[in-house]
Image (tube, rainbow, N blue to C red):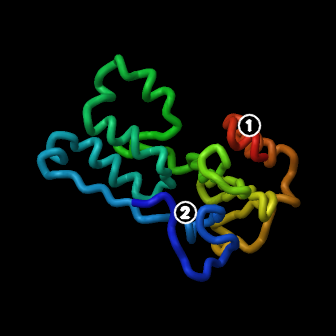
Amino acid sequence: TGDHGEIENPHHRPARIYNYYDEIVRIPFLVHTPKSWDTAHPQAIRNLRANRGVNVQNLDIAPMLAQVLGLKADRKNDSLFTAWKGSSLLERLDADRTIQVLSAKDIHTGNREGFGLVKGKQRFVLSSLEGVKFFDIEKDPQQDTDLWGGMGAKERGVWLDFIHSNTLMTRIY
């Protein structure tokens, strides 16, 4: 897997790492397990298969690998799993979970920053190039109609609470 996709003529600008839309952030992620592991861990395999249609993020890879290596079974590692923001793909994930896509100066050099949040079929985007945007992906799959300006304070508050739970997103916002 990669950390972002590539596309020659993206529907949304800008391209590459400053784009928080599906055309760039939805990348293939393949997991292959040996038959012996499948047989020994049938519930984990059922969970992995059930998560096929769930939004996942790169932050979910480390917890999954730690679980495969048996580190989750050792209670001494509980603080490690608590500190991680991701979730193991071998556990059943909430289909309505919020995932984040982040591009910050703290992570790489450059003068552009922003992030995207996806919760179920909704997307919040904030970038130094586009400002704030919000989309209903189910009703507007191309994400052409920005709904942020017409949202009520309560609806906005749910997203802003999530943003303010993350230091980098709070700074960028």
**Quarter-wise, where is residue 28 in the image?**
bottom left
Task: Say whether marks 1 and 2 touch (CB < 8 Å).
Answer: no
Q: Position of residue 74 (x, y in %)?
A: 30, 21
What's the CA distance linking mark 1 and mark 2?
A: 22 Å
Residue wearing tag 1: 164
Is the residue marked by circle 1 packed among few (<14), some (14-19), or many (20+) residues within 10 Å?
few
Q: On the picture, is 136 further left or further right than 25?
A: right
Is the residue marked by circle 2 packed among few (<14), some (14-19), or many (20+) residues within 10 Å?
some
* Residue lying at 26% horizontally and 35% vertically, measured from the top left: 69
Q: Which mark is residue 45?
A: none
Outermost residue to the left = 36
Foreground pick, 132 / 38: 132
Q: Position of residue 100 (x, y in %)?
A: 60, 49
Element class at badge 2 = helix
**Quarter-wise, where is residue 141 in the image?**
bottom right
For the image shown, how many numbered marks are present on the structure?
2
* Residue lying at 41% horizontally and 52% vertically, measured from the top left: 51
Q: On the picture, is 155 further left or further right than 5?
A: right
Sequence-wise, which precedes: disc 1 or disc 2? 2
The quarter in which the N terminus is drawn is: bottom left
Residue wearing tag 2: 25
Is 75 drawn above or below residue 45 in the view shown?
above
Element class at badge 1 = loop
* Residue lying at 60% horizontally and 46% vertically, measured from the top left: 107
Q: Position of residue 11 (x, y in %)?
A: 65, 78
Q: Amino acid at mark 1?
A: His
Is 17 drawn above or below residue 43 in the view shown?
below
Q: Position of residue 82 (x, y in %)?
A: 48, 27
Q: On the picture, is 46 further left or further right than 166?
A: left
Foreground pick, 13 / 49: 13
Q: Amino acid at mark 2?
A: Val
Q: On the picture, is 128 further left or further right than 97?
A: right
